[in-house]
Image (cartoon, rainbow, N blue to C red):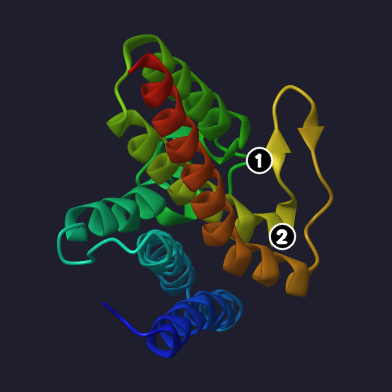
Amino acid sequence: MLSFKQAFIQRAFLTGLIGIVSVLGDKGLQNGKSEIVRAISDNLTHAIVGGITWTLVLVLSKQSLTENLRRIITCFFMSSLIDVDHFITAQSWDINDATHINHRPFLHCTTIPVLIWIIMYLIYKLFNIPILITYSWMILASFISHHLRDGNRRGLWFWPFGSTQPIPYYLYLSLCMVFPYFIYWIMNWQLTKHTEELLLII
């Protein structure tokens, strides 16, 4: 069990690391000398931020990182694989085609992970499958951390309503760093509510 000071330092480090990785990734995207270098830099940043986001959620929840390593890795790859929709939309594996499509690809629609989260939550409520809460938040963490980074350039796309204005740079960084705390607070509320419901049944 970590002391309060150690826990605070760990949380502060991971929170700051999300911001640092995002800034470095943005620099790589801006200064990359070729399309492939910029794409790899951007995608790797998405992956790392997604992985750190879930790591921080676990730390806040006081869960073992070693026991949940597979879930951290899952979020890492999920945040990265979202960009495969560029190639699907372009109908080409050429990086230049994938990065020069004339509209946003479907996995960059923020409505999708929100709907997935709602559906999984309803299934959990109907069939009492608590693990779906964790999986639904992992999906949301991976997608939204990705979308927030892209949102600095293009805004968030909420089909069928349209897109927001591009998110100001320092606001986007702040949202990325605060997002894991939001997930933790809502997950904790859901867990508390689920426990209360079980006690009422008993």
Identity of the residue drawn at 67% across and 63% down: 175
Identity of the residue drawn at 44% across and 69% down: 45
Residue 124, x across and y down, in percent: 38, 20
Q: Quadrant of residue 2?
A: bottom left
Q: CA distance from mark 1 to mark 2?
A: 15 Å
Q: Is residue 34 visible?
A: yes
User: In the picture shown, does residue 105 fall above or below 76?
Assistant: above
Residue 102 got which mark?
1
Residue 153 got which mark?
2
Residue 76, x across and y down, in percent: 32, 58
For residue 162, side relative to residue 52 (left or right) = right
Identity of the residue drawn at 60% across and 35% down: 109
Between residue 1 and residue 19, name the one nearer to us.
1
The extreme top residue here reads: 126
Identity of the residue drawn at 38% across and 25% down: 199
Amino acid identity at mark 1: Asn
Q: Secondary structure at mark 1?
A: loop
Amino acid identity at mark 2: Arg
Tell me if mark 1 has few (under 14), some (14-19) or many (20+) residues whose alpha carbon lies within 10 angstroms of its own.
few
